[in-house]
Amino acid sequence: MSTPAQILLTLAAAFAVGYLFYRLGIPGGLMLGGIVGAAAFNIFTEQGNMPYIARFFAQSVAGGFLGATIDREKLRSLKRLGWPLIIMVAGMFLSDLVIGVLIVWLSPLDPVTALASGIAGGINDVPLIAADLGADAGKVAVLQFVRLMTGIGLVPILIRAADRGAGAGRTERGGAKKSAAASVSIGETLLALAAAMAGGYAGKRIGIPAGTLIFSMFAVALLHLTTGKGRMRPRIKQAAQLLAGAYIGRMLGREDLLELPYLVLPALVVVAVFVVNCFLSAALIRKSCSMTVRESMLATTPAGAGEIALLSEDLNITQDLAADIMLLHVFRVIAVVSVLPPAIPFLSTLLP
């Protein structure tokens, strides 16, 4: 079988399962399904193949979409939200260290994979970062899915229970601001894509861990701040998610399938540490800000801004506070993916 045929069949398998997961509404479905489809193809045929350019494109696009969220209004809000943001980021950093130590102690996973599994970034971004760091990206993707499920499944139940115990907080129905996304022109998409690729290439050439994602993010952020442009059409991100899933999935083989039972304890560690962090960080935020139990716990939930937008409405968070909480999560992801990956190679040497 020729290499082009291998690539096409790997992509077809990734697309088939990724599209199914997407239609079923599974969070991160395109990437997770892509991983499952490409992995299944590689496990059964040992012919999975995906070139490095797929990873580069996916990382650059992921960074570009993060960069496009940064505008002057968000930067001005940093002063008002500074203390909660510091608490959030510090809590996520400490959680990653604790997760790394416990996973190394309790499982055969290597330190870099253990630390990458605890990065509270985007579910579609972290496995790519893990691959850049030399970690086992497939296992990281599984544990990142566990983190996301903790954030959107378990923590909301705990928020409702804690909120009842603390008494009623704000009850007016608000939810996140819902504005119809403005259509993005092909010209703006191409401009943002060019900036993301240029930044990603510069980051790759410099050679720092996750440099492709970090520099593409900064390149598009600069474009957005100076010109007001920098958005890309959602289809570009979906294509990047699918390519990321195919690239990661083709790295999984039959030996990895036999090692899946070893992920049970690491998964329990991820759930336990992020839940404890949610309670502790929320308590610190309540002491410094006028947030209720419900709002402070939502601010420290290990999920993404998109999921937070949906959860805030279900939890009756007021509109203004919901917007602030989502903004905190946007900057939390940016801080985490900018600082933690370059530090992981050094931190991994400190783990037993």
Image (cartoon, grey):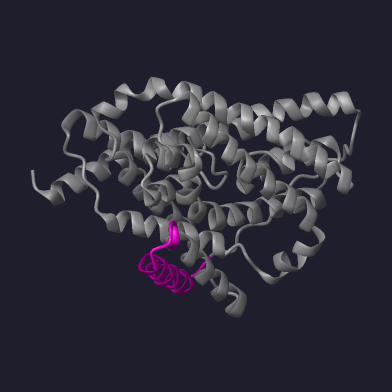
Q: Is residue 107 above or below residue 19?
A: above
Residue lying at the far left in this picture: please name it.
1
Q: Is residue 149 left or right of residue 234?
A: right
Which residue is rendered at x = 49% and y = 38% of the image? Answer: 351
Q: Nearer the viewer, residue 271 or 351?
A: 351
Residue 276 appears in which quarter of the rendering? top right
Q: Is residue 40 left or right of residue 287?
A: left
- Quarter placement of the N terminus: top left
Task: State which region is magenta.
Answer: 184-211
Which residue is rendered at x = 78% and y = 39% of the image? Answer: 282
Q: Nearer the viewer, residue 34 or 256?
A: 256
Q: Is residue 164 left or right of residue 39?
A: right
Q: Position of residue 162 (x, y in %)?
A: 81, 26
Residue lying at the far bottom in this picture: please name it.
226
Q: Position of residue 253 (x, y in %)?
A: 25, 32
Which residue is rendered at x = 39% and y = 20% of the image? Answer: 261
Residue 201 covered by magenta stretch:
yes
State the predominant SS element of the stretch in magenta.
helix
Q: Is residue 302 left or right of residue 75?
A: left
Q: Position of residue 202 (x, y in %)?
A: 40, 71
Q: Is residue 51 above or below residue 269?
A: below
Q: Is residue 241 above or below residue 274?
A: below
Residue 177 in view of the camera: no
Which residue is rendered at x = 44% and y = 33% of the image? Answer: 142
Residue 44 covered by magenta stretch:
no
The number of callouts visible is 0
Q: Position of residue 279 (x, y in %)?
A: 75, 33
Residue 250 appears in which quarter of the rendering? top left
Q: Is residue 188 above or below residue 300?
A: below
Residue 288 in view of the camera: yes
